[in-house]
Image (cartoon, helix red, strand yellow):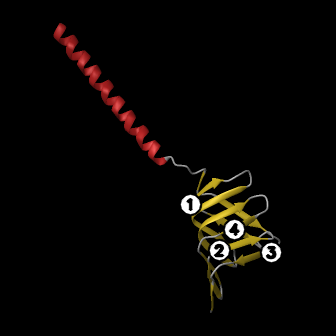
């Protein structure tokens, strides 16, 4: 009877230890997925009287109440053009965006590669700055 009790307790301890190990592995996997990103795959839009510009990115971080830093694969897309870059500061209140990273603007008959851009006036005006290369088709 003592032997049966020892075997039973060993079995319970073994099961308990195995369960604890499995829980630790699950928590470790969850912690690896968490990062310093405030928003995963953010999506915004700038709407003006003439067009709507959709903005997407892989990740975003709040800089303050209105400004968001968009990181990795940032894309601005409208029916007329698209802009691709890696980092943009987007102001949700003013509906403006500014980037100081290499950017590629493409439209029907033009491509512009620049060191940055500024979208203002509700998306009606885009200013490119830094060394820029304009290709007309």
Q: Position of residue 89 (x, y in %)?
A: 67, 62
User: Is label 4 in contact with label 2 (beta carbons under 8 Å)?
Assistant: yes
Q: Secondary structure at mark 4?
A: strand
- The image's mark for residue 98 is 4
**Quadrant where the image shows the N terminus:** top left
Mark 1 vs mark 3, foreground winner is 1
Q: Secondary structure at mark 3?
A: loop
Q: Which residue is painted at 38% across and 35% down in the image?
A: 24
User: Could you tell me how far apart the alpha carbons at marks 4 and 2 are, in whole angstroms?
Assistant: 7 Å
For label 1, the crowd category at 10 Å Cα-Cα, with few meaning under 14, some 14 to 19 and many 20 or more, is some
**N-term mark: 2 or 1:** 1
Q: Quadrant of residue 134?
A: bottom right
- The image's mark for residue 58 is 1
Q: Position of residue 124 (x, y in %)?
A: 78, 74
Q: Please name the residue that numbered disc 2 is placed on.
A: 116
Q: Which residue is painted at 19% across and 12% down in the image?
A: 4
7 sits to left or right of 130: left
Q: Please name the residue that numbered disc 3 is placed on.
A: 50
User: Could you tell me how far apart the alpha carbons at marks 2 and 3 are, in whole angstroms?
Assistant: 24 Å
């Amino acid at each position: 009877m003592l032997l049966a009790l020892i075997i039973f307790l060993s079995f319970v301890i073994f099961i308990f230890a195995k369960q604890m190990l499995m829980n630790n592995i699950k928590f470790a996997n969850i912690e690896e997925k968490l990062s310093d990103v405030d928003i995963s795959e953010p999506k915004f839009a700038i709407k003006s009287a003439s067009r709507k510009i959709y903005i997407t990115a892989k990740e975003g971080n709040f800089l303050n109440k209105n400004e968001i830093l968009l990181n990795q694969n940032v894309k601005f897309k409208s029916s007329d053009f698209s802009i691709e870059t890696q980092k943009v500061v987007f102001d949700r209140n003013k509906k403006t965006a500014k980037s100081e990273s290499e950017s590629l603007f493409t439209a029907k008959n033009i491509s512009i590669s620049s060191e940055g851009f500024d979208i203002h006036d509700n998306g009606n005006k885009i200013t490119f700055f830094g060394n820029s290369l304009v290709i007309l088709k």
